[in-house]
Image (cartoon, helix red, strand yellow):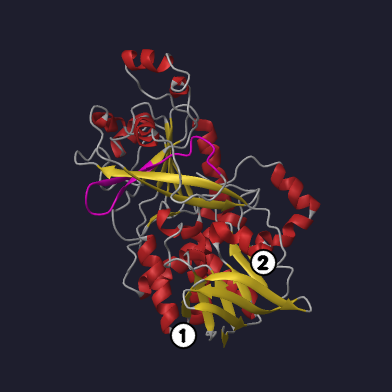
Amino acid sequence: MTKQNASIVICGAGIAGVSAAFHLAVRGGVRDIVLVDERPPLTLTSDKSTECYRNWWPGPGDTMVAFANRSIDLLERLARETDNAFLMNRRGYLFATAKNGPALAAAARETSSLGAGALRIHRDNAEDYIPAPPHGFEGLPDGIDLFEDQALIQEQFPYLSTETQTMAHARRCGWLSAQQLGMTLLTQAREAGVTLLRGRVTAVRSTGGRVNAVTVETDRGTSEITTRKFVNAAGPFAPAVAQLCDLELPVTLEGHVKVSFSDPRHTVPRNAPLVIWNDEVRLPWSQEERQALAESPETRALLDPFVAGVHGRPEGAGDTVLLYWTYEEAGSDIVLPVPYDPNYPEITLRGMTAVIPRLAEYFDRMPRPYVDGGYYAKTPENRPLVGPLPLDGAYICSAFSGFGIMTAMAAGDLLAAHVTGEALPGYAPAFLLSRYDDPEYVALMKSQAASGQL
């Protein structure tokens, strides 16, 4: 057994753990940090995401909007420092609907009131509307542009369905290269002295209710790391790692997948924002297809309405399109690679035609799809866990269900403040594990329908 010392051991080299290491070492000047993962960095779930960011979040309160705004502030700072090494853009999110205009308008008003920026309503003209460029993030409006005129929507976004009656363009939103972001953070963290150790944490030892050592199994044997501080940033493995500290986390796991394919016809314009359809969808089938599907119990469900939320965007400089749709409950046990419905690519493509009709051009011969996915670690109200744990010296930075990339910078920043004793932002209490000890908080969250997850 080898022995070493560390000021802090971080378990998990996904985006949460890497961001925590970056903020502790690079921004905070903490030395002798060991970052442990049995896999290569940023390969379990961090590279399986939509790679998007947004400050469009429902309540209660402005907690998640403030958290997202802080993260975007930090992303923009890093982009300026690195000449935008991770290709951050500000194309925005387009929420579109043919049936639920009042609900979308209400969501836009709420999000604006919570701190997402000004609400600009376009009914007669779009003279003050500033279209989003395909690249860059500087000098662009925040807030929300709400279109409530079908002709204006078609004028500005002719690729959307002509049935679109209401559309909200959330502006402090866009996407980036998650892999490049993670590697930028990791490279700077290692230059600041962070050690990356390939191995699996198998024990967290304590004396008198305080962390004093961490055991790591590596290819070369067992390593005992003496430390007074341990951070659980293990993503979907966070519940299992918490058990090493004799803790149970209120976290469930959900499998999620995405599909990508080549779009040589550019049915999704290469300069389009992320597009989200807010209505239920009945998949478009020919009469012959409908009759065939109705004959089998295994395929009859394909004729039923599917949930709202299908979304997609162009990716990169080529012809790739990414599509996402969580239309059914996924498994909660970690199986890698993530299992998925073999019909998922076709179902998602057909569903997306509700908002971008030209995708139907691929019904006869769909381009070869690539399906990838990972697991969300999710708290009951879908807010993260960031801060100290009951075991003295133990911390958590996890449960970023569908919003890990976009909030990783604020999460790492907050985790570092907890560890080093710096001043905490106003939203810090909302992410503590101890929040579940407050009956009023639990009751409030149970009364809320929205989770902020697309």
Pick whichever, 127 or 87, lies toward us.
87
Instruction: Label 2, secondary structure: give it.
Output: loop
Residue at the image position 42 percent from the left and 74 percent from the top? 186
Up-down relation of residue 131 to residue 435 (above or below): above
Looking at the image, residue 290 sits to the left or right of residue 45; the answer is left
Three-letter amino acid code of the residue under disc 1:
Gly
Q: Name the image quarter holding residue 366.
A: top left
Q: Position of residue 244 (x, y in %)?
A: 67, 66
Looking at the image, residue 160 sits to the left or right of residue 404; the answer is left
Q: How crowded is mark 2: few (under 14 residues within 10 Å), some or many (20 or more)?
A: some
Up-down relation of residue 414 to residue 225 (above or below): above
Q: Position of residue 282 (x, y in %)?
A: 43, 24
Three-letter amino acid code of the residue under disc 2:
Leu
Q: Which residue position holds label 2?
A: 244
Q: Residues within 10 Å of mark 1 (few under 14, many from 20)?
A: some
Q: Which residue position holds label 1?
A: 193
Residue at the image position 74 percent from the left and 61 percent from the top? 434
Q: Name the image quarter holding residue 358.
A: top left
Pick whichever, 291 or 444, lies toward us.
291
Residue at the image position 40 percent from the left and 18 percent from the top? 293
Residue 147 seen: no
- The question of residue 326 being in magenta is answered with yes
- The question of residue 322 being in magenta is answered with yes
Residue 190 seen: yes
**Circle nearer the N terminus (2, 1):** 1
Q: Where is residue 15 in the image (x, y as percent from the top left)?
A: 47, 64
Question: What range is drawn magenta here?
Answer: 312-331
